[in-house]
Image: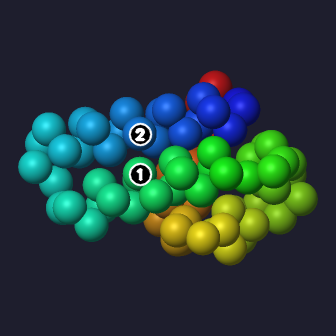
Amino acid sequence: MDNRTLARRLTRIAHDLESTHASVFRIRAYRRAAETILSLDRPIGDIVAASGRKGLADLPGIGRKLSTTIETLMQLQ
């Protein structure tokens, strides 16, 4: 999955969370993660291949829980 597609999916999840009145902080986390992924200068798949979930969690705005979600989304493609 390319960076743009993954960022779109994370943004869509943020919108879905917003419609269910989820935590504002959780919504912001998904949007921040989407922005981080769009700003990367290399494919997110390369980061996962090289460093796995830890590589994702090391990115700005992406924590342990979001790294798991991102990894799952990438496997579902």
Q: Which amino acid does label 2 sit on?
A: Thr
Q: What residue type is labelled 1?
A: Arg
Image coordinates of residue 36 in percent, x first then y, are 59, 56
- Which of the 4 quarters of the picture holds residue 62? bottom right
For the point 50% across and 32% down, the residue is: 8
Instruction: In the rendered structure, find residue 72 and report the number of the disc placed on it.
Output: none
Q: In which quarter of the image is residue 24?
A: bottom left
Residue 24 showing in the rendered view = yes
| Quadrant that contains the N terminus | top right
Question: In the image as oriented, which residue stretches furthest toward the left?
Answer: 21
Left or right of 31 on screen, residue 74: right
Please state which of residues 72 and 62 is positioned toward the viewer in this rendering. Answer: 62
Q: Is residue 50 above or below residue 12?
A: below
Q: Residue at x 29, y 55 (%)?
A: 27
Q: Position of residue 67 (x, y in %)?
A: 58, 60
Considering the numbered disc 1 on the image, is that residue within a helix, a strand or a loop?
A: helix
Horizontally, residue 13 falls left or right of residue 24, namely right
Q: Position of residue 73 (x, y in %)?
A: 56, 39
The residue wearing badge 1 is: 31
Q: Residue at left 48%, top 33%? A: 9
Q: Which mark is residue 11?
A: 2
Local crowd size for mark 1, using a 10 Å CA cut-off: few (<14), some (14–19), many (≥20)? many
At numbered mark 2, what does the secondary structure look like: helix, strand or loop?
helix
Q: Where is residue 49 in the image (x, y as percent from the top left)?
A: 86, 52
For label 2, the crowd category at 10 Å Cα-Cα, with few meaning under 14, some 14 to 19 and many 20 or more, is many
Real-space CA distance between mark 1 and mark 2, rounded to the nearest whole angstrom: 6 Å
Cβ–Cβ below 8 Å for labels 1 and 2? Answer: yes
User: Which is nearer the N-term, disc 1 or disc 2?
Assistant: 2
32 or 77, nearer to the observer = 32
